[in-house]
Amino acid sequence: MNYEINEGTLAVIANGEEKTRVLEDEYDYQISESAFEIMDKSCKYFGSSYNGRKEGSKSILGVEYKVPIVVEDSKNIIFFPTTSPHDNECIWLSLNHIKDYYQTDYNQTKVIFDNNKEIVIPISYRSIENQILRSARLESLLRNRKNS
C-alpha cells in the first residue's frame, strides 16, 4: 500500500524496520514501509523532501534534533517525532490532532487525539511536552511569516 499523510492522519507508529502502523481518524493501517519512508514520501508528494522540510524547520527553530516538520503547508499538517526519525521505534504525532496527554508511568505518556482515540507511547511526559511546544512554536512562527 502506498500511503501519504493527510488531514486525517493522527500518528505514524514505527513497528520495526519495515513495518508501520498508521492511525487515522477512522482507520488503522499496517503498512510495509518504515515510518521514515512514509514521512519522506509524504513530504515529496506535497512538493518537498523530508530533508528539505527538516532543514527549513531547523532554520526557523534553531534546533538540531527531533525536529518537527511541516508535511503539507496549506493544510498546516505538522508532525513531530518522539525519538530520532531514523529509529525503528520512532512515533510521529500530528500536532493538530492532539487533544490531551498525560504521564501514565515513569517513562510512558498517554496521548488522546481529538477524536478520543488513545495511544500509550514509551516516552516521558516532559519529552512529549517539549516536542509539542516546539511544534506549536514552528506553527506560530510560520503563521506570523505568512501574515506579515
Image (cartoon, rainbow, N blue to C red):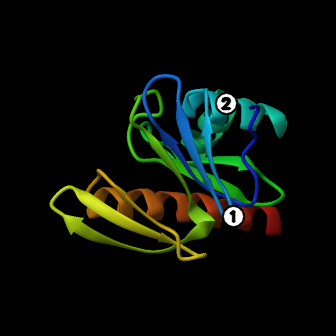
| Label 1, residues with CA under 10 Å away: few <14, some 14-19, many ≥20 | few
| Label 2, residues with CA under 10 Å away: few <14, some 14-19, many ≥20 | some
Front-most of residues 111 and 95: 111
Q: Which mark is residue 54?
A: none
Front-most of residues 51 and 2: 2
Left/right placement of residue 111 relative to residue 73 reads left
100 w.r.t. 123: above or below: below
Q: Which mark is residue 26?
A: 1
User: Residue 55's spot in the image, x, y percent?
Assistant: 61, 34
Q: Nearer the viewer, mark 2 or mark 1?
A: 1
User: Residue 59's spot in the image, x, y percent?
Assistant: 58, 41
Left/right placement of residue 18 relative to residue 102 reads right
- Based on the displayed image, in which of its 4 quarters is residue 16 positioned? top left
At 56% from the left and 30% from the top, the residue drawn is: 36
Mark 1 or mark 2, which is nearer the start of the sequence?
1
- Based on the displayed image, in which of its 4 quarters is residue 53 positioned? top right
Does residue 91 appear in the picture of this structure?
yes
Residue at image mark 2: 40
User: Residue 76's spot in the image, x, y percent?
Assistant: 74, 60
SS assignment at label 2: helix
Does residue 148 appear in the picture of this structure?
no
SS assignment at label 1: loop
37 w.r.t. 139: above or below: above
* Type of amino acid at the residue the image marks with label 1: Glu
Q: Quadrant of the N terminus?
A: top right
132 w.r.t. 49: above or below: below
Left/right placement of residue 76 relative to residue 89 reads right
At 53% from the left and 23% from the top, the residue drawn is: 18
* Type of amino acid at the residue the image marks with label 2: Asp
CA gap between label 2 and label 1 equals 23 Å
